[in-house]
Image (cartoon, rainbow, N blue to C red):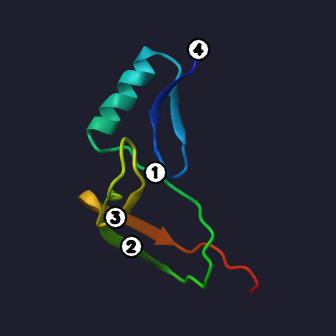
């Protein structure tokens, strides 16, 4: 079985790559992505206390002056609506 990269899920963030093992899987990934049905789940560590759940809703665009793949920033050039839902699942000591 030959595994190949089908899609970069998040250029500039995690660099996670979705892989396909054949043409059928690649077509399925393309269909799901094109229909806006590809969803991402992340785990993070907050620098301060975070309780409960909620969402951040803001437009994300490209940093000014960037060429090619520039860093994504809030309200940057060509900004598009974005929504991130979060839920605190654990809390450490301190």
Where is residue 18? Give x, y as percent.
50, 35
Name the residue carrying label 3: 83
For the residue pair 94 and 38, the one nearer the viewer reads as 94
Name the residue carrying label 4: 2
Q: Residue at x 36, y 23 (%)?
A: 27
Q: Quadrant of residue 72?
A: bottom left
Where is residue 28? Give x, y as percent.
37, 27
Where is residue 19? Give x, y as percent.
52, 29
In this picture, residue 84 sits left or right of residue 17: left
Quadrant holding the N terminus: top right
Q: CA distance from mark 3 to mark 1?
A: 12 Å
Q: Disc number at residue 55?
A: 2
Tell me, yes or no, whether the two marked residues, 3 and 1, touch with CB atoms within 8 Å: no
For the residue pair 18 and 60, the one nearer the viewer reads as 60
Q: Which type of secondary structure does the marked residue at label 3 adopt?
A: strand
Q: Which type of secondary structure does the marked residue at label 1 adopt?
A: loop
Q: CA distance from mark 3 to mark 2?
A: 7 Å
Tell me, yes or no, whether the two marked residues, 3 and 2, touch with CB atoms within 8 Å: yes
Considering only order in the chain, which callout, 2 or 4, is on the residue closer to the N terminus? Answer: 4
Would you place residue 34 above or below residue 93 in this image?
above
Q: CA distance from mark 3 to mark 4?
A: 35 Å
Q: Which type of secondary structure does the marked residue at label 2 adopt?
A: strand
Q: Residue at x 46, y 51 (%)?
A: 40
Name the residue carrying label 1: 40
Q: Residue at x 26, y 39 (%)?
A: 35
């Amino acid at each position: 079985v030959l595994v190949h990269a089908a899609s970069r899920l998040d250029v500039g963030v995690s660099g996670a790559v979705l892989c396909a093992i054949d043409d059928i899987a690649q077509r399925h990934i393309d269909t799901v992505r094109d229909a806006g049905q590809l969803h991402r789940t992340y785990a993070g560590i907050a620098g301060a206390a975070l309780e409960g759940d909620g969402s951040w809703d803001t437009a994300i665009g490209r940093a000014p002056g960037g060429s090619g793949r520039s860093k994504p920033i809030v309200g940057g050039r060509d900004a598009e609506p974005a929504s991130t839902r979060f839920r605190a699942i654990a809390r450490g000591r301190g």
